[in-house]
Image (tube, helix red, strand yellow):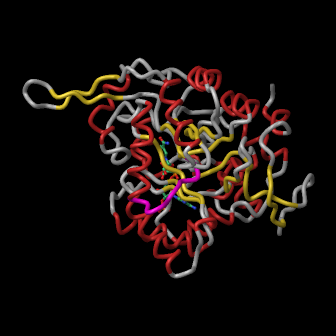
Amino acid sequence: MPEKQILNKGPAVIQWVSSKSGASPRRDYIPTRIRMGNGVELPFIGLGTSSVENSNEATEYSIRTALDLGYTHIDVTPGTHKIVGDVLKEYMDSGKLTRQDFFITTKLPCISHSRANVATALNSQLKYLQLDYVDLFLVQSPCGITIRQTAQGRNKFEPTNYSLPETWKGMEDVYNLKLTRAIGISNFNIDQITTVYCNANVVKPHNLQVEVHLHWPQKDLVVLCQSLNVSLTAYAPLGSPGLQQTIDQRGDTSPLDEPLVIYLAQKYKKSPAQILLKQLTQRNIVVIPRSVNAQHLRENLDSLNFTISDNDMEALANVRSRGRIYTYTSRYPYFLCLFNFFFNFRRNHPEYPFNENDDE
Ligand SMILES: NC(=O)c1ccc[n+]([C@@H]2O[C@H](COP(=O)([O-])OP(=O)(O)OC[C@H]3O[C@@H](n4cnc5c(N)ncnc54)[C@H](OP(=O)(O)O)[C@@H]3O)[C@@H](O)[C@H]2O)c1
């Protein structure tokens, strides 16, 4: 079914803001949040916190600047829980924010896929975050890992024996314990989403976080999720220009340099990044761009405040798809520290989610 028809059936959209310029021919107001299947509201614009520079100072600066600008949604990357927790505590202690003002997403590490370990992992993250609950907790990857010690005392990584439905039971447990307001999955393919969805005893996934951007539009996945009422979050929504090396190696341009995007930026008097982010939020997809630049952070948050016409949305949808950036088959400069040890191993994992040749 075409994506446009599905949009009407997707999660209800609430809390609207006025469109100042370029008002939509269809709408006078623009949503700032999406309502997930259980009624919890997820802000359309979030802050990604992974740091290519691997600098705690840069991450902290980014979080503080974002909160001061009015960001309410933070996607916590592994390794940044303490930084996020310390800043949030300071803002709450000083009365600048209350717990209800912000939305925190964290992820289950691949080494915690047994049902019992899910709660242990989340409780440990909550300790670093200095919070009683998170707002969204995602299974980071379908590839569960067990670490065994060899006779020589070395660590050996093996695929875990726990099935995805079993891990999901652990996710339902933490949801029922109210350690999180919503639960979801990340980096799962269509078959894996369907497996979890069909086997979920109590709670269906509320959100899927995957790579989506102009050059990797994930049209089939978007249609599936919107028809199942699973909200979507796009990571690398700008095409991860920080990983330019990867893009250069493939001989591709970054989505930010795409001629149509530059043309539309001039037409709408917006930046190329704002065109890319708006294209996604207008498809009802939440975005979590990362930035350590105050001007970029402001631009990204302001990207909601205009509307791209139907014709221009169609033109953007027709830009040639290039392929995913995050394949997890080579060493990237950041991401889960532990994952760095076994990227190549993951390709051989029975649950490795991506097809080498998948392209849209
Ligand atoms: N679930 C998962 O497995 C997974 C995997 C990857 C990422 N993520 C999440 O998704 C977030 C975003 O992904 P990402 O960091 O790979 O990609 P991204 O957000 O698409 O790109 C980040 C890059 O874009 C630049 N940028 C940001 N705003 C800009 C603007 N307005 N104009 C020009 N450049 C701009 C940033 O540089 P400046 O700092 O100079 O602005 C940075 O280099 C991550 O931080 C992480 O939280 C999740």
Residue 284, located in which quarter of the rendered image?
A: top right
The x and y percentages for residue 36 are 71, 45
Q: Chief secondary structure of the magenta span?
A: loop
Compared to 74, does 339 lie above or below? above
The residue segment tinted magenta is 128-136
Q: Say if 117 sits above or below 165 in the image.
A: below
| x 43%, y 63%: residue | 130
**At 42% from the left edge and 49% from the top edge, which residue is drawn?**
123
Which percent across, then down, holds residue 153? 10, 31
Residue extending farthest bottom? 94
User: What residue sits 17% from the left and 28% below the top?
Assistant: 149
Tell whether position 135 is magenta: yes
Q: x, y percentage for residue 209?
A: 57, 40
Which quadrant would residue 160 be assigned to in this image? top left
Q: Is residue 144 magenta?
A: no
Q: Residue furthest front?
A: 177
